[in-house]
Amino acid sequence: MGSLLPQLAIDLSRPAPAELVALFPVPVREVQLEIGFGGGENLIAQAQTKPDTGFLGIEPFVNGMAKALAAIDQLELQNIRLHFDDATSLLAWLPDASLSCIDMIHPDPWPKRRHWKRRFVQDATVMSFARILRRDGELRFVTDIADYAAWTLQRFIRSGDFDWTAQCADDWRTPWADFAGTRYHAKAARAQRPPCFLTFRRV
Ligand SMILES: C[S@@+](CC[C@H](N)C(=O)[O-])C[C@H]1O[C@@H](n2cnc3c(N)ncnc32)[C@H](O)[C@@H]1O
């Protein structure tokens, strides 16, 4: 972790490059972001299957970051850059319309009412997602906590900046075609809590 993280960490003390693809040592056509990647299962799988996409991964939990770094090292992935901190600072640093996709996979649900203000999805974060996603870019959110799904739907719909892409119930019951699963996703399945996959398109 000690030697690889400094090479892959995004330097927020410098302005972001005009084109985010310049962050990567290999040619990439577009850039995606995963917020709170945990152990990195989905991030690593996506980076493997889409070598011409650059991935930014954010995770403040040290064990998760160490696990992702070990996989990046072993697989010699060149299309991942990392942020080992809270997501807020990186979101503020990213240029307007610079991302094609943002994934939030089982973000902390904070089920108690008095903790709802800690949920990552708030009106202000939806505004910042709208700023950094390009037109037609997607924000993909999955949770096994029904109340957090309803909360998130409400905030995206009222923002006016996103369309919810679902046409029928299967659209939110079925995983995205490229979804690789994560530790929390498996935990929800074991507990028989069905996940809700929400996809919002930037208008
Ligand atoms: C419930 S876990 C899910 C982890 C992983 N996505 C999965 O599905 O296994 C939520 C993750 O979000 C991370 N997290 C919490 N608050 C965050 C924040 N403000 N910015 C970035 N990541 C955050 C936590 O460290 C944790 O790894």
Image (cartoon, rainbow, N blue to C red):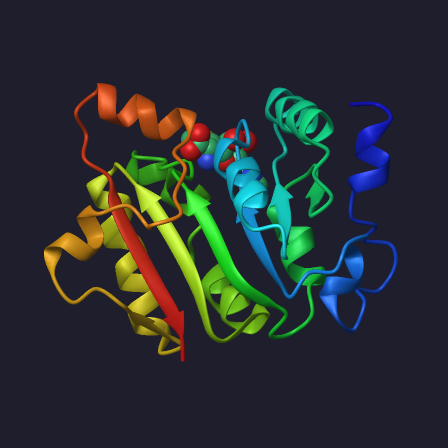
Residue that appears at 50% across and 31% down: 41
The mark tally for this picture is 0
Residue 3 is situated, as x and y percent measured from the top left of the image, at 87, 26
Q: Quadrant of the N terminus?
A: top right
Residue 73 appears in the figure: yes
Residue 157 is situated, as x and y percent measured from the top left of the image, at 29, 70
Residue that appears at 74% across and 60% down: 27
Horizontal placement of 27 versus 129: left or right?
Answer: right
Q: Nearer the viewer, residue 30 or 91?
A: 30
Residue that appears at 68% across and 60% down: 28
Q: Nearer the viewer, residue 194 or 116?
A: 194
Residue that appears at 30% across and 35% down: 111
Q: Residue furthest left?
A: 169
Residue 73 is situated, as x and y percent measured from the top left of the image, at 73, 27
Location of residue 169 with respect to 68 vertically, above or below: below
Horizontal placement of 4 versus 198: left or right?
Answer: right
Location of residue 23 with respect to 41 vertically, above or below: below
Horizontal placement of 113 versus 59: left or right?
Answer: left
Residue 123 appears in the figure: no
Residue 61 is situated, as x and y percent measured from the top left of the image, at 61, 27
Q: Quadrant of the C terminus?
A: bottom left
Q: Nearer the viewer, residue 49 or 101?
A: 49
Q: Quadrant of residue 108?
A: top left
Horizontal placement of 12 versus 195: left or right?
Answer: right
